[in-house]
Image: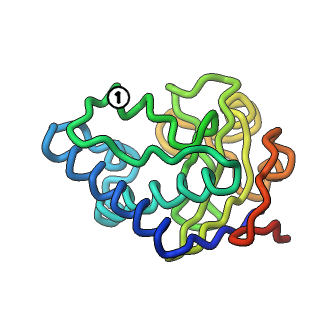
């Protein structure tokens, strides 16, 4: 696991990007992707903000450019942002939830499980979509998930982390 503490300026940038994404979703009438999987979940604003914070943490560790949000962007433009480079980041509701693979995920897609606590992000581990589908179990509808304690270690992801004082590997 990698523990990342976001400095105030990066936290603000990520949180702002999450709010902008939520506003654009409302304005453009895009479907609420979080409601599909958890209709009784907490307010969607928080989901968008925590997702952006987790993406920022991955960008900080691996040196990817955080593109944040584009005002008045189309759904296709937002999908192409690749906020965490070649990695897909999924934010779990707790450290012990399953990491899900969606039907849109290519088999070789590396998916990082994250958990956000205020300005601290835990990068719990990762798996490819195919690993999740093969070794996981059906957890939500037709979606498969892999428990967080069965994920690959972050240092095995195949991307070299950049040196930094805001993050470190933990047990």
Query: Where's residue 50, x and y in %?
Result: 45, 62
Q: How many marks?
A: 1
Q: Is residue 21 left or right of residue 166?
A: left
Q: Residue at x 27, y 53 (%)?
A: 20
Query: Where's residue 23, x and y in %?
Result: 20, 51
Query: Where's residue 122, x and y in %?
Result: 66, 66
Q: Callout 1: helix, strand or loop?
A: helix
Callout 1: few (<14), some (14-19), or many (20+) C-alpha neighbours within 10 Å?
A: few
**Residue 15 falls in which quadrant of the image?**
bottom left
Closest to the observer, 100 or 22: 22
Q: Quadrant of the C terminus?
A: bottom right
Q: Is residue 142 left or right of residue 5?
A: left
Q: Is residue 122 left or right of residue 139?
A: right
Q: Residue at x 45, y 55 (%)?
A: 52
Residue that mark 1 sits on: 77
Closest to the observer, 84 or 170: 84
Closest to the observer, 126 or 98: 126
164 to 99, vertically: above or below = below
Q: Quadrant of the N terminus?
A: bottom right
Query: Where's residue 60, x and y in %?
Result: 63, 56
Q: Residue at x 67, y 23 (%)?
A: 107
């Amino acid at each position: 696991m990698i523990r990342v503490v976001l400095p105030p300026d990066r936290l603000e940038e990520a949180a702002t990007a999450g709010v902008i994404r939520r506003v654009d979703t409302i304005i453009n009438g895009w479907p609420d992707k979080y409601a599909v999987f958890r209709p009784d979940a907490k307010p969607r604003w928080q989901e968008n903000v925590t997702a952006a914070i987790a993406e920022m943490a991955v960008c900080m560790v691996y040196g990817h450019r955080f593109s944040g949000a584009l005002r008045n962007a189309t759904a296709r433009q937002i999908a192409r942002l690749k906020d965490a480079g070649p990695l897909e980041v999924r934010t779990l509701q707790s450290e012990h939830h399953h990491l899900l693979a969606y039907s849109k995920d290519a088999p070789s897609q590396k998916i990082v499980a994250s958990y956000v606590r205020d300005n601290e992000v835990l990068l719990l581990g990762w798996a490819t979509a195919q690993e999740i589908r093969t070794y996981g179990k059906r957890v939500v509808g037709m979606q498969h998930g892999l428990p967080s304690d069965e994920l690959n270690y972050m240092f095995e992801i195949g991307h070299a982390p950049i040196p930094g004082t805001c993050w470190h590997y933990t047990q």
